[in-house]
Amino acid sequence: MTVSKIEPSRHVKGRILVYLDSGDMLKATEQEALTFSLYPGRVLSAEELRALRAAAGRSGARNRAAEMIGVRALSKKELCRRLIQKGESEEDACAAADWLEEIGALDDLRYAKSVVRHYAGLRYGPAKMRDELYRRGVPRELWDEAIASECSESTEAIDAYIRSRLRAAPLDDKMRRRLCDALRRRGFQWEDIKSALRRLDAEDWEEE
């Protein structure tokens, strides 16, 4: 196989387009151009072409992975899944995620803490946070550390939520039921909710 033309990509910096006399076109990087000594007229053996395709695939997956986490934080599992959805092979996708993790650009614990911090700020409970961490592909062994590090005591979060709701409505039996149901949906444990309801009986929160 012979390289018929090489030109830089107009859309992606550092990418080159390698045209072959077969009519195929490879998306590679400047590193592959140097490694494989690519130039118009270069004859590639079948083995060299396979190696070039593999190297270009790895580079392409790395570039796409870096672009993805530059736009939005992701867990390692999420990143692999999205790369595969975009057409990368499973091998290249996982290798790209491993590379980003090795250089510190991808960190599941850091990501888990950011997720917990976000939902804690919205006054959600630990159960909701665990659901989100599961949905986002964060390894289960990181959940407790992230929640302990970034989530305030459930008591504080529940009390803050109740105070926000009681500003607009009186405290009666109907409101108690609504508060209880809402707090369960938000991921708080029943024991913590019962404690909050007992505190309601001991304090006149409507006057605060």
Image (cartoon, helix red, strand yellow):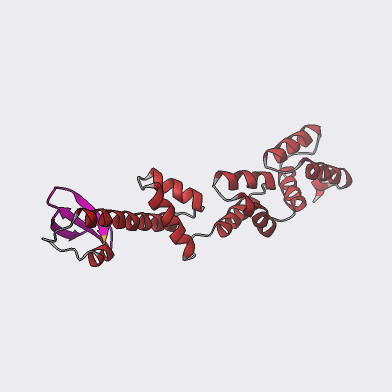
Q: Is residue 42 left or right of residue 35?
A: left
Looking at the picture, tell me which residue is in the foreground, 49 or 160.
Answer: 49
Q: Magenta residues?
A: 1-28
Q: Residue drawn at (34%, 56%), measured in percent from left and top?
A: 58
Furthest-right residue in view? Answer: 202
Looking at the picture, tell me which residue is in the foreground, 124 or 164.
Answer: 124
Q: Give the vertical position of 168 relative to 16 (above or below).
A: above
Total numbered circles = 0
Q: Is residue 7 magenta?
A: yes
Q: Is residue 177 left or right of residue 136?
A: right
Report whether residue 10 is seen: no
Q: Is residue 44 magenta?
A: no
Report whether residue 159 is seen: yes
- Residue 138 location, x and y as percent? 57, 50
- Residue 31 location, x and y as percent? 28, 65
Looking at the picture, tell me which residue is in the foreground, 48 or 164.
Answer: 48
- Residue 82 location, x and y as percent? 43, 46
Q: Residue drawn at (67%, 49%), measured in percent from left and top?
A: 123
- Residue 54 location, x and y as percent? 30, 54
Looking at the picture, tell me which residue is in the foreground, 187 or 32.
Answer: 32
Q: Residue drawn at (63%, 52%), measured in percent from left and top?
A: 141
Q: Is residue 23 left or right of residue 182?
A: left
Furthest-top residue in view? Answer: 174
Q: Residue drawn at (49%, 55%), measured in percent from left and top?
A: 73
